[in-house]
Image (spheres, rainbow, N blue to C red):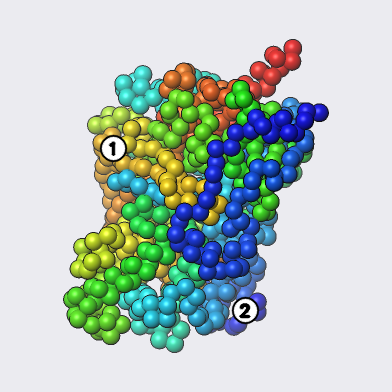
């Protein structure tokens, strides 16, 4: 995959250099150049809800042009039936948990604001999500679905997707992908020329 | 040659796979492509399985730290051995990316159900697949246990003693350190004097390790560069040639791409291959067949969608603390002690993170650069056993996930905190764990894609572990404060699943004897972390390998006596 020219000094600019292995470059470029995504598992309105939730859990006002997509990774995983090796026994299988949980978020929005989650203001959406994060939100869904565990799993998946993206890695000054040929300056306050100042 | 029909009649197949998970059934029904894939094919009837005519001396199931060393030992003794590994055989130089998401294929990603008050995180935390098993993603941290770790019960009246002492494992530790090319300090600060030092000097200390030295010194705690199974200089490896030195890429837990880390695929496995081992990757064992007397006659496995049978005279089960008891339970094998699946232990592994003024850039250098075993038997302990302290480097995706789970941060607060990633350093402990009746593995009603019951792991941290974690967290907070950290926080966690097919002196309360041989089944050996009678206050990999070599030696000695 050809690497476009990125602003010098950015982590993205490192991707085109010999400091990044072919396998590493392929993984990161694929995320940078991901095509537009059509939901495969969730219904369009449920997918839109997940996107709205993700936009509050990871607000990106600094990326109006190209925000890091988070909902596609969830939908794609559910469509393929992939797991990450474990599941809280308290939760149903992932597909069911996401369907129920997203429905439950609508219930919180309806109960608290008498409106669809996607129509709420950002502050109202945050308030609804905080109720979920606190572990005891309103709604019949949460009588059977463990709110705390569901929120933790949702948040962990979105977080791992977010920080796997080169733009997020650039945001935190992570340059670990540029590990060729070696790191020699590894101690406190030691920086190699290719690492960003932090 | 015996008549195949007669052998067939003696085969016992208790496994009756079917797909019960309604979602999975729906998936298969919805999607004709998925339904056509081999994974969705219902398990065929036994008579449809191709009979493997050749009987081999030994079959080894699982090629991690438990299976690989004994595989090399057995083949070097001239035995005909087939090794079955559930996962693929990788080419790390080409396939392994310096990217956490891209490396997720190293983990055992089939779902385990995690129950109890303190469910164990599995996946990347506690499992592995592929030729090399979880050594493909272990941190390479390879301290020896201290002798007292093996007799907790004698010293405290709680827990369990090993059926032999440290002196029995010592020669194997020494052999492993030399063979694997372990980098570490000589002399070693803790434990009995050693006959031989580490073959290579310690790896360089990264920022987190330097900070831990600073904090520990201020509190009068001794530290030392840790023993790590990653090369601080080129090293010659029999069967493979020169292995190159570690490049400090800090990615041990997501796979080493240059062979510097002593995972099994660059050490014991090439050695075994050179001596004629027959290694079959992508081979998932479902059935262990026996004759009327209860002796193992062979195994049935699925390779690339086809069912195969391999007959053997001896079976070595090395699938780890989840898949080993799962296979025993599925096959109703070696169960008379009632201990299969019981005594599930996990190391207390609380982590403490802090933010420093200095740049740490925690993605560089061997992650566990530093160790202290001063806390092996703390004077002010209100608990049984003890723990070690370890500095830790962190990869960004794993760390961010821990922040989300542990600090419950989300939104702007999470993004703001992660901005400080390059200034974060961690310490964690690894402590002993006592077995408890509430902690066990069982087969769940829910089935996996193969139609086999998923394992369910019950784990409830008990008073002893709670006290140990509290003691350790308080100490680590003091170390980080003394080192100049701000915003110190703790992430509670458990590491390494241990003990679900325990070793002991009697078949009344143990699954295998001191040699690793099943009390119930004379030609079945088990060798992995499931046989540990107690958890030990160190990372398990080195001891699993030591047990593996020892089991092979005990087995070979027994065979020799029989021949003579």
Residue named by callout 2: A3
Q: Position of residue A153 (x, y in %)?
A: 37, 61
A1, above or below B285, in the image: below
Q: Quadrant of residue B488?
A: bottom left
Q: Position of residue B89 (x, y in %)?
A: 67, 51
Horizontal side of B358 relative to B363 (left or right) equals left
Nearest to the observer: residue A29 or residue B325: B325
Residue named by callout 1: B462
Residue shown at the point (28%, 75%) measured from the top left = A106
Q: Residues within 10 Å of mark 1 (few under 14, many from 20)?
A: some
In 3D space, how far apart are the residues under numbered discs 1 and 2 (Cα atoms)? 53 Å
Q: Residues within 10 Å of mark 2 (few under 14, many from 20)?
A: some
B71, above or below A82, in the image: above
Q: Quadrant of residue B269?
A: top right
Horizontal side of B32 relative to B310 (left or right) equals left
Q: Position of residue B228 (x, y in %)?
A: 53, 42
B140, above or below A65, in the image: above
Nearest to the observer: residue B559 or residue B496: B559
Q: What SS does tag 1 mark?
A: loop
């Amino acid at each position: 995959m050809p690497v476009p020219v990125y602003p010098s000094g950015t982590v993205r600019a490192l991707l085109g250099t010999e400091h990044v292995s072919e396998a590493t470059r392929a993984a990161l470029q694929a995320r940078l150049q991901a095509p537009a995504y059509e939901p495969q598992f969730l219904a369009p309105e449920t997918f839109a809800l997940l996107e709205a939730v993700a936009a509050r859990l990871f607000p990106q006002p600094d990326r109006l042009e190209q925000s890091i997509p988070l909902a596609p990774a969830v939908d794609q995983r559910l469509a393929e039936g992939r797991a990450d090796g474990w599941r809280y026994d308290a939760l149903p299988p992932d597909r069911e948990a996401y369907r129920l949980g997203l429905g439950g978020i609508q219930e919180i929005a309806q109960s608290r604001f008498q409106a669809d989650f996607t129509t709420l203001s950002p502050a109202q959406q945050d308030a609804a999500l905080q109720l979920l994060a606190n572990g005891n939100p309103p709604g019949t869904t949460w009588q059977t679905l463990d709110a705390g565990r569901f929120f933790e799993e949702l948040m962990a998946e979105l977080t791992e997707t977010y920080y796997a993206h080169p733009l997020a890695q650039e945001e935190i000054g992570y340059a670990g992908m540029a590990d060729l040929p070696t790191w020699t300056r590894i101690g406190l306050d030691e920086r190699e020329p290719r690492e960003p100042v932090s | 040659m015996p008549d195949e029909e007669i052998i067939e009649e003696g085969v016992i197949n208790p496994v009756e796979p079917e797909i019960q998970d309604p979602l999975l059934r729906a998936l298969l029904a919805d999607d004709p492509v998925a339904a056509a894939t081999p994974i969705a094919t219902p398990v065929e009837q036994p008579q449809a399985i191709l009979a493997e005519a050749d009987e081999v001396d030994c079959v080894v199931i699982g090629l991690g730290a438990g299976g690989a060393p004994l595989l090399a030992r057995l083949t070097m003794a001239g035995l005909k051995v087939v090794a079955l590994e559930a996962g693929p055989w990788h080419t790390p130089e080409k396939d392994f990316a310096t990217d956490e998401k891209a490396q997720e294929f190293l983990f055992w990603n089939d779902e385990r159900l995690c129950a109890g008050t303190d469910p164990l995180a599995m996946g990347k935390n506690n499992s592995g697949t592929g030729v090399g098993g979880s050594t493909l993603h272990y941190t390479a941290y390879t301290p020896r246990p201290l002798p007292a770790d093996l007799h907790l019960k004698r010293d405290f009246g709680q827990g369990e003693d090993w059926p032999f002492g440290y002196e029995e494992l010592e020669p194997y530790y020494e052999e492993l350190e030399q063979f694997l090319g372990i980098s570490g300090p000589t002399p070693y600060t803790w434990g009995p004097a050693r006959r031989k030092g580490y073959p290579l000097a310690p790896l360089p200390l990264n920022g987190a390790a330097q900070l831990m030295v600073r904090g520990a010194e201020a509190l009068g705690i001794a530290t030392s560069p840790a023993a790590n199974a990653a090369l601080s200089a080129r090293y010659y490896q029999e069967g493979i040639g020169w292995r190159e030195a570690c490049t400090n890429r800090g990615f041990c837990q997501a796979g080493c791409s240059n062979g510097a880390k002593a995972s099994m695929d660059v050490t014991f496995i090439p050695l075994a291959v050179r001596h004629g081992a027959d290694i079959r990757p992508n081979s998932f064992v479902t059935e262990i067949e026996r004759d009327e007397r209860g002796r193992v006659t062979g195994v049935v496995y699925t390779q690339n969608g086809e069912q195969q049978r391999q007959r053997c005279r001896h079976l070595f089960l090395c699938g780890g603390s989840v898949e080993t008891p799962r296979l025993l339970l599925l096959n109703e094998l070696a169960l008379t002690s009632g201990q299969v699946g019981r005594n599930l232990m996990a190391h207390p592994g609380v982590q403490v993170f802090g933010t420093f003024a200095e740049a740490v850039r925690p993605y560089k250098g061997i992650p566990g650069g530093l160790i202290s075993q001063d806390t092996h038997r703390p004077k002010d302990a209100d608990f049984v056993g003890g723990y070690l302290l370890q500095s830790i480097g962190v990869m960004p995706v794993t760390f961010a996930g821990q922040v989300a789970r542990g600090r419950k941060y989300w939104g702007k607060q999470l993004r703001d905190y992660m901005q400080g990633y390059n200034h974060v350093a961690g310490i964690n402990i690894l402590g002993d764990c006592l077995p408890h009746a509430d902690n066990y593995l069982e087969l769940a009603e829910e089935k996996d894609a193969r139609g086999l019951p998923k394992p369910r792991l019950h784990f409830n941290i008990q008073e002893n572990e709670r006290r140990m974690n509290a003691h350790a967290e308080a100490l680590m907070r003091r170390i980080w404060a003394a080192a100049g950290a701000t915003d110190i926080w703790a992430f509670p966690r458990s590491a390494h699943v241990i003990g679900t097919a325990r070793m002991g002196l009697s078949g009344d309360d143990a699954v295998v004897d001191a040699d690793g041989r099943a009390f119930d089944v004379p030609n079945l050996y088990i060798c992995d972390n499931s046989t540990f009678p107690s958890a030990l206050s160190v990372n398990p990999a080195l001891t699993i390998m030591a047990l593996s070599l020892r089991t092979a030696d005990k087995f070979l000695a027994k065979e020799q006596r029989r021949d003579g």
